[in-house]
Amino acid sequence: MTKLYRQQGSALSFAKRLGLGAVILGASVFGFSTTASADNVTVATTTQGSLNHIVGSSIARVLSEEMDVRARVQPHTGESALLPLVHSGQAELGLAAINQAMGIYYGADNGRPQENLRILTTLFPVKVGYFVREDSDIHTMEDLRGKRVTHGYMAQGAMIDVVNALLANGGLTPDDVRTVSVPNVNRGGDDFASGRADAFFHAVGAGKVSEVDASVGGLRLIPLDTSDEAMSRVLETFPQGYRFDQPPADGLAGFSEETPVLAYDYVLVVGAGVSDDLVYDMTRTLAENKSKLVQGARVLQDMSLERMYIDWEIPTHPGAVRYYEEQGLSPAAPK
């Protein structure tokens, strides 16, 4: 395996490609390195205990065990903080939902595109929904009209499109419900458990959902309306979303039967300046060690080779493309 993380002249080639000589200066300002030791890989994640951090920790452990690298996890407050570090070369890898990665890549929120981001792999679908008490009279998204519903997510801005898409599935907007403003999804679960909300938004299988399920005596996830009209409203609000039919499983709170839920993909992002050989080796290692990844993050059981290579608007790193093409894969269309 190569002992160079970064391709020589990566910042220069990037500048030529964009026709922006200023990028050369930016490389030194932002800390691009063309000679960093291959002994260290930084995996930027969100805060400890989050799904992002759990998955990133499993990835770092497997890379360290299976490759000649020392991979370490570096937690941050959110994707808007960690992905710019991957762009600037201060971290090799970062994790994010695809909608978050695309927004940051294009600079949708702040007008500062982070065009040095590349996709290494698509990891798994995040499945989400609104949960209610098992004995609640709320059975459809439309039934949320006039109810107290967690919303806001000031510390997780990318969740706004997701929750609004769920409301749109029922023909609703935030004005049609009594929004309970929360900073993040875990706080929403706490507010629901304490009786301040009638429904809370969270990821299927999350530890907080299991905790709330135990504290209130049972939860039920509100299913998607799968009609063409209802799903078209979802996609108008959240184009990266898709339907996932979630079966019940031992220990999975909120499900007594197969239920249609909203899903979107989680991706592993790598800097454009990380060498092709290193990215190839990391991609191969992750693809060949799924069982070890799952030991650290159960959600990675949904990872599959066929869905690792997807034709996102963010380019896939050439080192990853080389591995996928060796496996006979072509980029799959987003769902």
Image (spheres, rainbow, N blue to C red):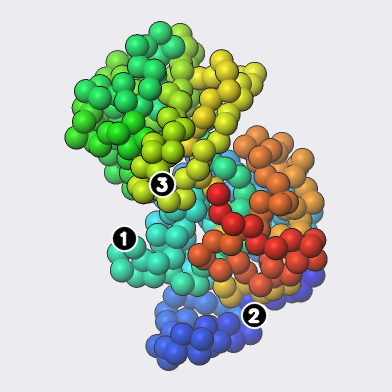
Q: Which residue is mark 2?
A: 7
Between 333 and 164, the one lying in front of the other is 333
Residue 227 locus on image (x, y percent): 44, 33
Front tag of 1 and 2? 1
The N terminus sits in image quarter:
bottom right
Residue 26 locus on image (x, y percent): 42, 82
Front tag of 3 and 2? 3
User: Is mark 3 in CB contact (under 8 Å) with mark 2?
Assistant: no
Between 12 and 102, the one lying in front of the other is 102
Residue 235: numbered disc = 3
In the displayed structure, 69 sits above or below 212; it is below
Q: Which residue is mark 1?
A: 109
- How far is mark 1 from mark 3, CA to CA? 20 Å
Secondary structure beneath disc 1?
loop
Q: How many numbered marks have been drawn onto this rendered protein structure?
A: 3
The residue at 80%/66% (across/down) is 326
- How far is mark 1 from mark 2, CA to CA? 30 Å
Secondary structure beneath disc 3?
helix
Q: Quadrant of residue 192?
A: top left
Number of residues whose C-alpha sits closer than 10 Å to that of mark 3, classed few (under 14), some (14–19) or many (20 or more): some
- How far is mark 3 from mark 2, CA to CA? 39 Å
Residue type pointed to by label 3:
Leu
Between 322 and 81, the one lying in front of the other is 322
Between 125 and 292, the one lying in front of the other is 125
In the rendered view, does 245 fall on the left or right side of 230?
Answer: right
User: Is mark 1 in CB contact (under 8 Å) with mark 2?
Assistant: no
The residue at 51%/38% (across/down) is 243
Residue type pointed to by label 1:
Asp
In the rendered view, does 292 fall on the left or right side of 86?
Answer: right
In the displayed structure, 294 sits above or below 247; it is below
Residue 212 locus on image (x, y percent): 44, 19
